[in-house]
Amino acid sequence: MARLTGVQRVWEASMIIACVFAFFLLLALVSFHPGDPGWSQAGLQLDVHNWVGATGAWVADLLLFSFGFLAYLMPFGAAFLGWFLFQHIKSLDEFDYLTIGLRIIGGLLMALGATGIASINFDDIFNFSAGGFVGDVISSALVPYFNTAGTILLLLCFFCTGFTLLTGISWLTIVDRLGEMALWLVRKCIALPQQTMALQLPKLALPSRSQDSNGSELDITSMRAEPPAETATPNSIDTHSSKDTHNISPNHSSKDTHNTSPNNAGVTDTQKAVDTHQDILSTQDTHNRQRSEPTLGDLEAFLDDEPPFSITSSSSDSNASPQQTKNSGFSLSGLRDAVKNKVSTEKTPTASDTAPDQEPSVATSDRSKEDSEQTSAQPQVNKTSEPFKRAALGATAIEVQEGEGDEPVTPMPSFDLLERADKHENPLTQEEMDAISRLVEEKLADFNIEATVVGVYPGPVITRFELDLAPGVKVSKITGLSKDLARAMSAISVRVVEVIPGKSVIGLELPNKKREMVRLSEVISCDAFQSHQSPLTMVLGADISGKPVIVDLAKMPHLLVAGTTGSGKSVGVNVMILSLLYKSTPEDVRMIMIDPKMLELSVYEGIPHLLAEVVTDMKEAANALRWCVGEMERRYRLMSALGVRNLKGYNAKVTEAISQGTPIKDPLWKSEESMETEAPDLEKLPAIVVVVDEFADMMMIVGKKVEELIARIAQKARAAGIHLVLATQRPSVDVITGLIKANIPTRIAFQVSSKIDSRTILDQQGAETLLGMGDMLYLPPGSPVPTRVHGAFVDDHEVHAVVADWKRRGQPKYIDEILNGEASAEVLLPGEQPDGEDQEFDAFYDEAVAFVTETRRASVSSVQRKFRIGYNRAARLVEQMEASGVVSAQGHNGNREVIAPPPVKE
Ligand SMILES: Nc1ncnc2c1ncn2[C@@H]1O[C@H](COP(=O)(O)OP(=O)(O)OP(=O)(O)O)[C@@H](O)[C@H]1O
């Protein structure tokens, strides 16, 4: 059984005392008798009428004397205070003194305002003033200066300001809610006659549930699928008026279903409504269900449409569409509860569940408002939200198709999909820290090292002790002793930080006895991440003091991740990918994922950010890298044609031209290479992130080619917006070669098994003393000093939830070329043969030779047209013919002569 902490026990005891006290006050006030002896008058102690005795009479008298009518609110105030403290404050460090101060001031202002107003306006109560002594004093002090009207105004001002300070509720919100409530009531009244009629009709039409179940299902389905006449309600206007089935919205369908359920009250009918709904779902094929059938989510959303009575529940109320409001015609709360039982087991959390204040900052309020209006108010289901409609890579335009199922309301996935972090506890007390500091000094002294601990920094995973070394003590001596120190201090490992930038001390990092887990949800929701401008912002985890570490892949511009198996690499890569999915839409960032292990990245299959299926075949992986080289070269040519220096400049120019209505035509377009008659317009280019989960496997299988392709991308791709994230569990020199290291300056090392491995990754030791499970050293670009980061943890089900959420927002449209494309001349590595070096000739070669020799025309475009192949392949065929002497080399006018005779006809 969970026990309460010390502070919690005090709060619980306070709550009990407050409640009992409140009840005592209530009894005392309710049974107050003016004849009883009290604070303001004498009486016989023997003859007390008050239910809670002389003390009650005395307290009630004091309260009524001081506050008048307001005294009757005091028992409720006391009970609320007890409950509030118990509910909201779990430990002393949660006290927000500013808020508490404001609440006290607010309470006092309200009391002064209320008693003053009562004192002026109301009749006496018993023999006390209506506002009590306090009200009399305040009103009599103000009236001479402000007259009665001015005093009341001033006291109203006290009351209203006090209310806001005490409760934190804005008066504007109250006014809004009152307005909504009034409108809701008016709509209800207007819709009442229609709903009464609607309730009459289904009673006649709905078949009884006691029929054979199949029959009943069919009947209900047919009623839903053919809305006219008998089943349609007068307010399903869209369903009636349109013959286009796409115009039947899930909301409408679900409403129709509700309206057809008889006797809309009581548990049995509630269950029937739910059953009816499920019957409908069961009779439809999956596709139709997703497109036009109501889902349980819709039913629940519909049922959530309650009158805006609650001031606090603003988000769901304000999202209610007029249509929904119109249709909410029967006992909602019971039905809603029944459905929510049904629904909660099936429903994966959706972004629409999020309160608006939990959105990432990229979710601008306008956009989300627009989206929510569209989803709730428009009858179409077949629509794609604008930002994802077109995200094109110039000539090779890629569209994101609309996702399956319900379209989420918010523009980005909600942080609610991630698991909440546990509450952090201070790992060490001051005494413990002092004791360990002394121990560290003693142990160092055992090794003849004179040092003083000058600072202790406890964090979630380790505690850093800063040491001031005596003059003449070399740091390397302590580094060399790190294992001995770990043994002497019974720690798993001790990391020595030789240089702390900006300080003259060294650091000694000791693992905490109790390690805390850094959850993705706690670091990703920080301001630094949300307000970062770059679409390639990623969160890695928390630094040694627990602050989130945010990095920008665009600045890296490539990242090498290494660590032994089980060190937390895959979780780290998942965290990086999820960061991108929380930061950027497919319009801004696209990804290619290469996963030789076929385990880690396949979960992302189907998200709209993907440019190609998750690659598991290594031949295809090489093709993908080659495609990136081609895309990089193409982007460079585009950028130079537009006179810009990087992707940001390119996108700014293209977007501006589009917004001015004069889109720029693709300057690289060649009429002979395309079927189009006119150059296409340039569009915004997304950044491309290539994630390789185990690139050692790729190097082993495909060989040197991969290394060279990676080096080629790494050298040049920064400006083109193509970024590599390479992870490996084999940090050996045959995998992380000099060529790769030279081109990828940003590295992350998780725990490794030896100093040598650490040097291979970071060019320095240290990673071998990491603690595993996401503990990492991050070497930022251009910095020789690595930063220790405790990687954020994200569980598989969180990854699944975010992936499912993105899948609902859109589908990827893969570019076939990426995996199966041919290598054009410009992406071939030095000395490399065109694609298919092992094959002798193209499959079309013989036919192409026959065609060229027959027609006596050796032009690339004619071969291209004849065999309906790409320009590159056709050009290669002609080049092969040239190499075999079938056609001549290109003449000065670009033409070739056909040398070989035409084939002999039989
Ligand atoms: N940031 C973290 N916080 C806490 N625990 C973690 C963290 N990262 C990883 N772990 C734990 O370490 C285990 C191994 O992590 P992970 O699968 O990422 O290792 P890996 O280096 O990818 O191993 P492999 O190369 O064999 O796949 C996880 O199952 C998890 O329990």
Image (cartoon, rainbow, N blue to C red):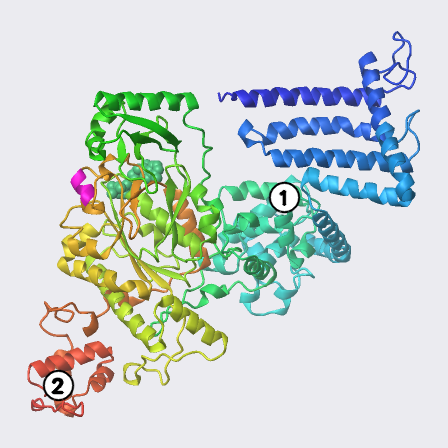
Which of the two marks, 1 or 2, is nearer to us in this view? Answer: 2
Can residue 746 be seen by looking at this rendering? Answer: yes
Residue 464 percent coordinates (x, y) = 34, 32
Relative depth, front residue between 415 and 124 = 124
Q: Quadrant of the C terminus?
A: bottom left
Location of residue 795 with respect to 634 vertically, above or below: above
Residue designated by label 1: 335
Q: Are marks 1 and 2 in contact (CB under 8 Å)?
A: no
Residue 638 covered by magenta stretch? no
Question: Would residue 544 appear left or right of 103 to someone viewing this image?
Answer: left
Q: Secondary structure at mark 1?
A: helix
Question: At x 77% / y 58%, what residue is drawn?
Answer: 190
Residue type, numbered disc 2:
Ala
Question: Would residue 296 appear left or right of 770 to someone viewing this image?
Answer: right
The magenta segment is 755-759
Residue designated by label 2: 850
Question: At x 64% / y 53%, what residue is drawn?
Answer: 318
Q: Secondary structure at mark 2?
A: helix
Res 500 → quadrant: top left
Q: Residues within 10 Å of mark 1 (few under 14, many from 20)?
A: many
Res 259 → quadrant: bottom right
| Label 1 to label 2: alpha-carbon separation | 76 Å
Location of residue 146 with respect to 742 vertically, above or below: above
Residue 236 percent coordinates (x, y) = 65, 61
Q: Earlier in the sequence, mark 1 or mark 2?
A: 1
Residue 825 percent coordinates (x, y) = 18, 74
Res 791 → quadrant: top left
Residue 758 covered by magenta stretch? yes
